[in-house]
Image (cartoon, rainbow, N blue to C red):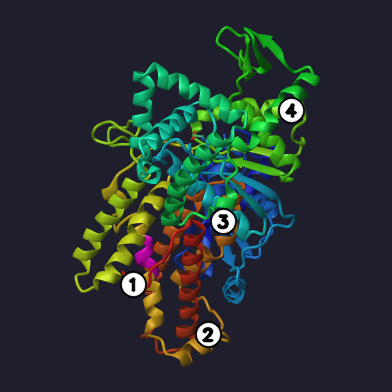
């Protein structure tokens, strides 16, 4: 509620700056406080007194100008000037109370659907199939999934695209190794149970044997020219590798199916067309035998335009070429009007360049929104990219298993009476959600330090804290009889206490937060909100007894506040792809 009033005052400051009443460079830190005496309204601000000097006005006079320019809000009943220039704000508590009743009756908790639904392509996860998924793919998968869920809640049409790396020279090496193993009569599926080991072995053969390397190169060419045997091997390899990925998606509760997979290989046959079209539009320049697009807006350190290589000397295509084809496909075949890429921040230049090329070439419509939503690196305690003790890349499977094991030990120590089955279930949910939440709650574009102890803590902005808050609100309802629950539907919320008002104010912000996440692709905004909501609920619960309250109407009203809190927390966590627990 306070936040809402602060926003209104910020808007007012902007208006007054436009009218040159407040100097344009003023950056007031707007403070809004609760009043001690309700006769002076609910909230008060000293903004007019703070700005009087820079505005060269008498504080009461400026206060009047602020009041005159304050945007209308359902939440504000009236305002008045007090003393030397305070502005007292009287809130419309009836309106606020009504909003709680309305949200509870709405299955979408009053989250407003988008007026014009978008066709959004969400490019997420997109691991390279030659190897196993590593921690870098965690961020793309879960941030992308959370934003996709949010867009869906708002009624947008979301098309998930898992742009897996399933093409390229390293497949020649892998296929040659499969062939060799098959000749030895080895069970291929067994060989592929650990892709890292398989990859390393194939690479070893490639480096040690000239014949093997030649065969590997041959097999790439055969694969590309559609050789049947090669394609069968390749298919087999990808099937196993994709099965590994989908095991992880399932564990992570990430909504991705095999139908969402449209890998690099899919665009292979279209790459020549991409080159031909760029050529026809005179966008290609030959440089050292390679075909390039030179973009004026990207310069190297000597100030010369940077090339985007489209086709190498010798005919080979690149990562960028495939992305151009994919963008064209997403525009023309999938009809996207918004395309979102959840890819490592370190690929920022790549995306700026390909976005620029597709716009120049008219592969996408000018009004289509192309967004690279980069994310930072997950680092270890030493502040460098997260590695195993021996310095290797951390497999995502191993990380998740360790999180579950640690959660098991923790939960068992906290609650020794749980059955083994319950314990396993709770440990799985706590372990996985801790990893996810620790990641989702960080600013997307910053690097962060991965730390099991802090993510599994029951205090602070963590998954265990929020999951526990959920079970706590839920447990109130375990003690309520069916008759009382039935009365909730017709009971009315009333907001007499400060803490009730504060909780109601927080609850009605949910709509705005969800829309922000959809717009800016920032699940961390939602995490902060849920954490604050849990905190506000907790102080409400301390100050305002629910079940022991004598007055039946007050009791029902508070139960309704608790009910909407429970639903909001659950819905919010669901948008993050986090399961909740009945008990823990
Ligand atoms: N496979 C790439 C990687 O692991 C990410 C692909 C992202 N998506 C795209 N359309 N380029 O780094």
Q: Is residue 560 visible?
A: yes
Mark 4 or 3, which is nearer the eye?
Answer: 4
- Secondary structure of residue under mark 1: loop
The circle drawn on residue 149 is: 3
Q: Is residue 263 magenta?
A: no
- Secondary structure of residue under mark 3: helix
Residue 141 image position (x, y, % from top left): 49, 46
- What is the CA distance from the residue labelled 4 to the residue labelled 3? 34 Å
Q: Is residue 17 shown left or right of residue 483?
A: right
Mark sitting earlier along the chain (3/2): 3
**In the rendered image, which quarter is residue 132 located in?**
top left
Q: Which residue is mark 1?
A: 583
Q: Which residue is mark 2?
A: 488
Mark sitting earlier along the chain (2/4): 4
Q: Nearer the viewer, residue 440 or 386?
A: 386
Segment colored magenta: 466-470
Q: How many residues crowd around disc 4 within 10 Å: few (fewer than 14), some, or many (20 or more)?
A: few
Mark sitting earlier along the chain (1/2): 2
- What is the CA distance from the residue labelled 1 to the residue labelled 3? 25 Å
Tell me if label 1 and label 3 are in contact, CB under 8 Å: no
Q: Nearer the viewer, residue 400 or 317?
A: 317
Mark sitting earlier along the chain (4/3): 3
- What is the CA distance from the residue labelled 3 to the residue labelled 2? 30 Å
Mark sitting earlier along the chain (1/3): 3
Q: Is residue 222 shown left or right of residue 132?
A: right
Q: Which residue is mark 4?
A: 273
């Amino acid at each position: 509620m306070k936040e809402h009033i602060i926003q209104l005052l910020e808007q007012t400051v902007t208006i007054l700056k436009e009218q040159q009443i407040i100097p344009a460079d003023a950056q007031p830190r707007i403070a809004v406080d609760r009043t001690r005496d309700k006769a002076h309204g609910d909230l008060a601000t000293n903004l007019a007194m703070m700005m009087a000097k820079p505005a060269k006005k008498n504080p009461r006079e400026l206060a009047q100008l602020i009041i005159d320019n304050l945007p209308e809000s359902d939440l504000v009943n009236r305002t008045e000037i007090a003393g030397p220039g305070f502005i007292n704000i009287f809130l419309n508590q009836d309106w606020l109370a009504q909003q709680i009743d309305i949200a509870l009756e709405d299955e979408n908790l009053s989250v407003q659907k988008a007026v014009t639904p978008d066709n959004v392509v969400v490019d997420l996860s997109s691991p390279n199939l030659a190897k196993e998924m590593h921690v870098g793919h965690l961020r793309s998968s879960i941030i992308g999934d959370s934003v996709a869920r949010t867009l869906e809640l708002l009624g947008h049409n979301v098309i998930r695209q898992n742009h897996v790396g399933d093409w390229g020279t390293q497949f020649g090496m892998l296929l040659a190794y499969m062939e060799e193993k098959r000749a030895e009569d080895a069970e291929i599926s067994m060989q592929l149970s650990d892709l890292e080991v398989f990859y390393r072995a194939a690479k070893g053969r490639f480096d040690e044997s000239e014949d093997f390397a030649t065969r590997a190169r041959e097999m790439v060419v055969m694969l590309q020219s559609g050789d049947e045997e090669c394609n069968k091997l390749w298919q087999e390899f990808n099937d196993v590798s994709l099965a590994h990925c989908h095991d992880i998606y399932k564990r992570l509760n990430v909504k991705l199916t095999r139908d969402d997979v449209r890998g690099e290989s899919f665009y292979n046959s279209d790459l020549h067309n991409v080159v031909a079209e760029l050529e026809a539009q005179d966008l290609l320049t030959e440089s050292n035998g390679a075909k390039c697009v030179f973009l004026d807006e990207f310069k190297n350190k000597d100030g010369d335009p940077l090339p985007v290589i489209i086709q190498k000397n010798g005919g080979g295509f690149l990562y960028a070429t495939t992305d151009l084809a994919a963008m064209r496909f997403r525009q023309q075949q999938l009809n996207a009007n918004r395309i979102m890429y959840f890819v490592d921040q370190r690929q920022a230049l790549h995306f700026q360049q390909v976005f620029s090329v597709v716009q120049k070439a008219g592969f996408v419509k000018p009004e289509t929104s192309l967004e690279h939503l980069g994310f930072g690196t997950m680092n270890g305690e030493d502040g460098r990219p997260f590695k195993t003790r021996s310095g290797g890349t951390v497999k995502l499977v191993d990380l998740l298993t360790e999180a579950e094991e640690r959660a098991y030990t923790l939960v068992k120590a906290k609650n020794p009476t749980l059955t083994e089955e319950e314990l396993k279930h709770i440990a799985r949910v706590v372990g996985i959600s801790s990893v996810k939440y620790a990641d989702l709650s960080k600013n997307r574009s910053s690097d962060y330090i991965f730390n099991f102890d802090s993510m599994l803590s029951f205090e602070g902005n963590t998954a265990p804290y929020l999951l526990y808050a959920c079970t706590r609100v839920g447990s109130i309802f375990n003690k309520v009889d069916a008759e009382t629950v039935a009365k909730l539907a017709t009971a009315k919320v009333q907001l007499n206490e400060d803490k009730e008002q504060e909780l109601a104010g927080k609850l009605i912000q949910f709509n705005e937060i969800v829309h922000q996440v959809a717009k800016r692709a920032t699940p961390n905004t939602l995490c902060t909100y849920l954490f604050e909501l849990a905190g506000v609920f907790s102080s409400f619960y301390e100050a305002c007894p629910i079940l022991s309250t004598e007055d039946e109407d007050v009791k029902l009203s508070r139960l309704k506040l608790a009910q909407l809190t429970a639903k909001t927390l659950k819905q919010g966590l669901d948008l993050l792809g986090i399961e909740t627990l009945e008990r823990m």
